[in-house]
Image (cartoon, grey):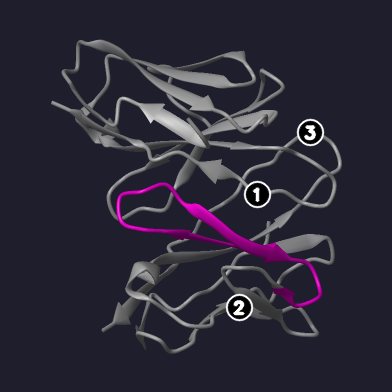
Amino acid sequence: ETGVTQTPRHLVMGMTNKKSLKCEQHLGHNAMYWYKQSAKKPLELMFVYNFKEQTENNSVPSRFSPECPNSSHLFLHLHTLQPEDSALYLCASSQVHLAGYEQYFGPGTRLTVT
Amino acid sequence: DAKTTQPPSMDCAEGRAANLPCNHSTISGNEYVYWYRQIHSQGPQYIIHGLKNNETNEMASLIITEDRKSSTLILPHATLRDTAVYYCIVRVVRSNFGNEKLTFGTGTRLTIIP
């Protein structure tokens, strides 16, 4: 596997379900991110982890719970979601350094909440 | 981070150069210009970034005006696979491991015409 992978690619869940999204990066990066992309809206940053420590929570509701057990893996735990949470959830990683850096994105998980 | 302005959509003939403009008139001296693109329902892909000088890589060229208030992304020989939404982002690159977020706008939807 290379780059950033995300599983599952598609997920349909009810409002009372609990599910988790998984992201794995094979690039040796030290930062990982969760973004949300709703239909016809710009990407929104949700969470940032640097060296496994959460450095940003962009006012995300508590029904979204991130977990970063190590610098290669990132999870997004979902519970009691609402239909408006249906969106494409994107994971990204980067190697932070002084001269600038780029974020590498995974293919995303298309989430539908029924 | 400074705000950017991009045209909502553009067309370009296959094989021709695609020139995508971006205005960032409030850019600060320590802010970089980044370009990403997003092919339908995929994760964004990093293209190029720069600070003051023009930059070129295997994907594209980035031309930044001398006053840094605008830039142009050039795809020298556009193909059908270049059809995507292109995002221009300006951001500070910090020397610590603090706020490393990218703020995406609505971008330019580039359509390559056969």
Q: In percent of the image, x 79 and y 66: which residue is there?
A: B28
Question: Which quarter of the figure has residue A21?
Answer: top left
Q: In percent of the image, x 74 and y 84: which residue is there?
A: B65
- Read off the residue under disc 1: A102
- Read off the residue under disc 2: B23
Which residue is situated farthest in the front direction here?
Answer: A1
Q: Which residues are magenta?
A: B33-55
The quadrant of the image that shows the C terminus of chain B is bottom left
Q: Does B46 lie within the magenta span?
A: yes
Q: In percent of the image, x 71 and y 48: which residue is there?
A: A101
> Tag 3: Cα neighbours inside 10 Å, few (<14), some, or many (≥20)?
some
From the image, state whether disc 1 or disc 3 is nearer to you.
1
Q: In percent of the image, x 65 and y 73: which residue is there?
A: B24
Task: Tell me, yes or no, if residue A62 can be seen here.
Answer: yes
Q: Is residue B89 left or right of residue B92?
A: left
Q: Chain of mark 3?
A: B
Q: Which mark is residue B97?
A: 3
Q: Whole-percent x and y of residue A49?
A: 64, 25
Q: Is residue A65 left or right of residue B99?
A: left
Q: Which residue type does callout 3 highlight?
A: Phe
* Above or below B107: residue A78: above
Q: CA distance from mark 2 to mark 1?
A: 21 Å
